[in-house]
Amino acid sequence: MSTPVVSIEHVGEHAGKEVSIRGWLYNLRESGKLLFPIFRDGTGIIQGVISLKEHPDAFNAAKGLTQESSVVVTGKVAAEARAPGGYELHVSALEVVQRVSESQPYPIQLKEHGVDFLLDQRHLWIRTPRQASILRIRAEAERAARNFMDSQGYTLTDAPIFTPAACEGTTTLFEVDYIDDQKAYLTQSGQLYVEATAAALGKVYCFGPTFRAEKSKTRRHLTEFWMLEPEAAYAHLEDMMALGEGLVSAMVQECVKNRARELEMLKRDVSKLEKIKPPFPRIMYEEAIKVLNENGNPAKFGDDFGGDEETIISKNFDKPVIIHRYPAAMKAFYMATDAARPELSLSFDMIAPEGYGEIIGGGERLSSYETVIERLRQNNLPEESFQWYLDLRRYGSVPHAGFGLGLERTVAWICGTEHIREVIPFPRMLYRVYP
Ligand code: 4AD
Ligand code: MG
């Protein structure tokens, strides 16, 4: 019987048995007649022991082997409480698939590097166990988000990336040359399109990349980021606040449950995440202004909240906080207003705890044709490009609502990373489109 090939994350199921692991050499410590390599295979790391006396061929193949050389190793799995992951591999054979040349060593060493250097090496940086853990948590959060939306009866309807017009204001639009002198824009949000699919299918969402030509150089901004955007016909502000609460809780709890090892690798304080369950605190924009003033911040009615304001407000809560009914003048053209207080919009933002900022923005949409036309004009938006959108108000317009959840901000908070650039495989930021 041939030796089974196993992944490191499942190595514990083979304790006492011989297995093969296909991966890379992460590190090598040499100590006389013993070698202590550390292997990685993308699912975890495992320490090996190779003895010159018992397995001279494996010993000679591994001795002096360069970091990140690709290897297939075979050996017996042994429980070892002191080893990372709880197991070690007593190596009996080692095949080098590709040896990294001494003249061009692997550029990322096991020491601290500057972040600009690491970002230039992002295609390699993702191999380090910390970065690989973050990407696994991101995948888990995406899976949890989709499962949750599907379980709530929402149908995934993908939105286009080339669009004829702005959704979130013209200052952050990426213009591209389309075919034959036409101009197109990279989408800032799939919202206008899910408003159309919601009228076709009822409850829908899109989940894909969105683009903002943001000149902001903060730890919360990317120029390309992923957004999950639900939209539902016959839904109101209240419904969306509840849906957002459920979605965020599901994403966090699934990561806590299924990615415990990765969160531990990141040294994340999981007790903070375990508390993230509905209901979340809700305050009106006007109350948020009061909280800010009480904390020495001079914000007044009509001001937008930046990172500093969001951090002050979120400090008062150990769950995400929902701020609703922002002044209508501050919000995008499509936002419905509160009939009882027309100066307020039926909008909400959700602010993550621990200073991670706004993870959700959304609300109820305008449903009347006349009001949409009026708002397009006020915002200097080209009516011709919005004719299809106006059709949604011409033909069976209904109250409807939705929101957008920023995936990277949510994952950065779950992981506790300092900057959101680490939670997307290849970040696109002001001044960075390489690699
Ligand atoms: O608040 P925003 O701009 O809302 C919209 O685009 C709506 N049309 C969504 C909708 O109602 N369907 O963006 C939504 C979320 C923000 O709360 C934030 O989490 C994230 O998208 N986001 C960004 N994330 C990373 N980098 C940026 N530059 C971001 N801009 C927004
Ligand atoms: Mg917003």
Image (cartoon, grey):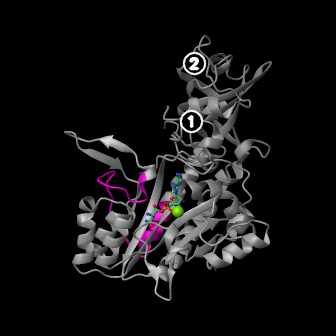
Where is residue 404? Give x, y as percent: 47, 64
* Relative height, residue 327 to residue 269 (above, below): below
**Residue on which the image places disc 2:** 100
**Residue visible at 52% across and 72% down in the picture:** 244
Neighbourhood count class around disc 2 (C-alpha, 10 Å): few under 14, some 14–19, many 20 upward: some
Name the residue type under label 2.
Val
Residue 80 appears left or right of 229: right
Is residue 175 located in the magenta-colored stretch of the structure? no
Dot 1 corresponds to which residue? Answer: 21
118 and 311: which one is in front?
Answer: 311
Q: Position of residue 299 (x, y in %)?
A: 69, 67
Magenta segment boundaries in residue numbering: 143-170
Mark 1, Cα crowd under 10 Å, few <14 / some 14-19 / many 20+, is many
Q: Secondary structure at mark 2?
A: loop
Tell me the quarter of the picture where residue 63 sits. Answer: top right
As drawn, 284 above or below 110: below
**Residue type marked 1:** Ile
Whichever of labels 1 and 2 marks the residue nearer the N terminus, that label is 1
Q: Position of residue 129 (x, y in %)?
A: 64, 40
**Visible in this render: residue 280?**
no
Could you tell me which residue is drawn at 70 percent across and 48 percent down? 265
Position of residue 365 in the picture relative to residue 405 (left or right): left
Judged from this view, the residue extending furthest toward the left is 180
- Give the residue displayed 68% in from the left and 54% down from the top: 416
Q: Name the residue nearer the viewer: 110 or 93.
A: 110
Q: Which mark is residue 234?
A: none
Question: What element does badge 1 sit on?
Answer: strand
Depth check, mark 1 against mark 2: the one in front is 2
